[in-house]
Amino acid sequence: MESCIQKKITNNFGENDLKEFIVVIWRRRIMLSFIFLFFLVISSIYVLIGIPKVYSSSIVVSPGNFENNAITDVNTARLFVLNDSFLSKVYKEANITSSSGVKEGIKVEGVKDTKFIKITVANKDPDMATKVASKIALLCVTQNESGYQKQCALINEQIDVGKARLQEYNEEIEKSKQLLTNIDNTGMVSLEKDLWRMRLLDMLKYLEDKRTILEERNFTLEKQIQSIKNTQIAKSEDNPAVLVNSGRKAPIVFVSGLAGIIIGLFMAFLLEYLKVNSLKSFLKTFSDRGFEK
């Protein structure tokens, strides 16, 4: 069942009459243009003045791989970087007196298909964004430096101990070989010589086995110390901040222009309706329609 308003519009313009629709738009073209331009101008002024520019600076770091490292993956990096104690050191190093809104602009994320970590700082001040990003990366390195050095010192100490022990084994092996060589020159009888020879051979084998194990252990430690890395800056610090919110302006203007067209069309057809029907009748129609529901 058609409502009253639908019947009246049908009587005046004709149902689905494209020609009448175009006639109404042409008749109200000035008003439609004004409303459209009004929304367009207001939205343009807003995006130019009302939306503050935001700049972003990013630095990529490579996490360390030593024991007790504070930054091993993106999750530990996020906890480490966004810690208030750490950020207070960043602000101090960067000579930042007012840190309001800085933490909210810091983002820590992983680089796809790599172990690298990307630290991004967004701020209204491009110099602030660059400075904070650089200081965060530098402090990530320096804060872990002591742990890295301790790990290296521990491995080097084990290597030195191993080398000293290896030297002792080599000396013992040389002594055993000399005894084997000189055993025939002793005054012992043949049976005693055989017993001593067997003991020396067993000792020599034991020492050589120990030396092999120790050499392998030292080799593993040397490879380990070559492979361990501290947190490092994988991308240069000299990374200027770039404007990041410019892409949001076009959609705002587009949506505002579209809203202007819709509101203009509504006003045009409302005025056309009121030309034939009084405002009182219009309001009564919607009032009756409300009661019907």
Image (spheres, helix red, strand yellow):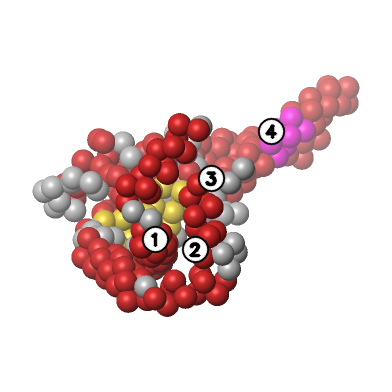
Spatial CA span between label 3 and label 4: 101 Å
- Residue at 52% x, 41% y: name it: 159
Image coordinates of residue 71 in percent, x first then y, are 43, 41
Q: Which mark is drawn over residue 260? A: none
Q: Amino acid at mark 2?
A: Asn
- Label 1 sits on a secondary structure element that is helix
Q: Amino acid at mark 4?
A: Lys
- Label 3 sits on a secondary structure element that is loop
Q: Which residue is mark 1?
A: 276
Question: Which contiguous range is marked in magenta?
Answer: 204-213
Spatial CA span between label 1 and label 4: 109 Å
Mark 2 residue crowding within 10 angstroms, few (<14) / some (14–19) / many (20+): few
- Residue at 38% x, 56% y: name it: 277
Q: Which residue is mark 3?
A: 3
Magenta stretch: includes residue 175: no
Q: Which mark is drawn over residue 12? A: 2
Q: Amino acid at mark 3?
A: Ser
